[in-house]
């Protein structure tokens, strides 16, 4: 399974940015972050335009529609579409949301996985299926959610750690999601951060959340790549890297 290390600062790529970035990309841009939902089904012309950028920059695939912890079988068509997208744009790193979002039909929301040992084993097996289907090692990503799971044998940080260790995958750390959950559920975001397997973090999604960034970078491997949401942030993050 291929797995490449990214460096520097990347940008969450949106279709609205495509024409401007093709014409003139910021000097500090090192890689692109792509959400397949933004691009699949947009047509051949948009795909070819996007390739102009993905041939110049390493790219990350930020998936959120596999329902990794869900009860239903993984969607084989979605996996085929993702594999095709990865091949078309030479995706360097793949990230999937650590949540469930479908049963018999899509739920259009990220729901937390019950933090039990059985759920750890289930999720680890699902990660193995995804890695086999895509032909690459993946990262799992913490996500924002609106409710706490009913069944809890461990806290969320312990659950994430158990899954990462057992699956031998990487952790893609979303600081915005962490901060949003901390505010919603009233827990200490810095303590939660310290409880994660930070030695397995190989990607940090900054979004617009800066207060946790210094803490995250101080405890993760050197030069871990980070992704921002706005072009205006690129220069600041590049200088701080």
Image: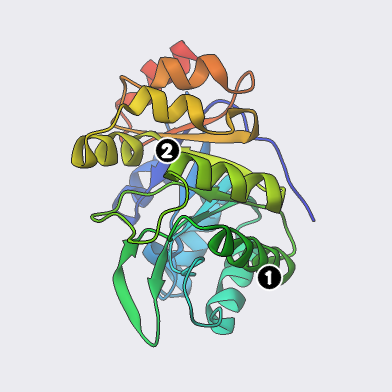
**In the orientation shown, which residue stands out farthest toward the front?**
153
Q: Which residue is mark 2?
A: 11
Residue 27 seen by the camera: no
Q: 222 left or right of 42?
A: right
Q: Above or below — where is 113 with respect to 233?
A: below
**Residue at the image point whose x is 42% and y is 15% from the top:** 214
Along the polypeptide, which appears first: circle 1 or circle 2? 2
Residue 162 position within the rendered picture, expressed as x and y whole percent measured from the top left: 60, 46
Look at the numbered disc 2 and give the secondary structure of its residue.
Answer: strand
| Viewer-proximal residue among 142 and 81 | 142
> What separation in Å lies between label 1 and label 2 (alpha carbons)?
29 Å
Q: 150 left or right of 61?
A: left
Look at the numbered disc 1 and give the secondary structure of its residue.
Answer: helix
Residue 79 position within the rendered picture, expressed as x and y whole percent measured from the top left: 59, 75
Residue 145 position within the rendered picture, expressed as x and y whole percent measured from the top left: 29, 53
Residue 129 is labelled as 1
């Amino acid at each position: 399974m291929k797995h490449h290390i990214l460096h520097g600062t990347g940008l969450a790529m949106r279709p609205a940015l495509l024409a401007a970035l093709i014409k003139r990309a910021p000097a500090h841009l090192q890689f692109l972050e792509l959400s397949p939902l933004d691009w699949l089904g947009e047509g051949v012309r948009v795909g070819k335009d996007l390739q102009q950028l993905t041939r110049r920059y390493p790219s990350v695939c930020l998936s959120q529609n596999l329902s990794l912890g869900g009860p239903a079988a993984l969607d084989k068509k979605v996996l085929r579409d993702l594999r095709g997208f990865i091949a078309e744009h030479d995706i360097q790193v793949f990230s999937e949301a650590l949540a469930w979002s479908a049963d018999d039909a899509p739920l259009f929301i990220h729901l937390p996985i019950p933090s039990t040992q059985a759920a750890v084993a289930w999720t680890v097996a699902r990660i193995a299926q995804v890695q086999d289907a895509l032909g690459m090692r993946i990262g799992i990503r913490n996500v924002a959610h609106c409710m706490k799971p009913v069944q809890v044998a461990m806290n969320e940080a312990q659950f994430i750690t158990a899954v990462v260790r057992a699956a031998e995958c990487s952790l893609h750390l979303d600081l915005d999601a962490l901060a949003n959950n901390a505010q919603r559920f009233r827990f200490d975001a810095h303590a939660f951060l310290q409880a994660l397997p930070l030695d397995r973090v190989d990607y940090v999604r900054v979004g617009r959340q800066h207060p946790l960034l210094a803490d995250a970078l101080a405890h993760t491997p050197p030069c871990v790549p980070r992704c921002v949401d706005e072009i205006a942030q690129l220069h600041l993050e590049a200088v701080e890297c």
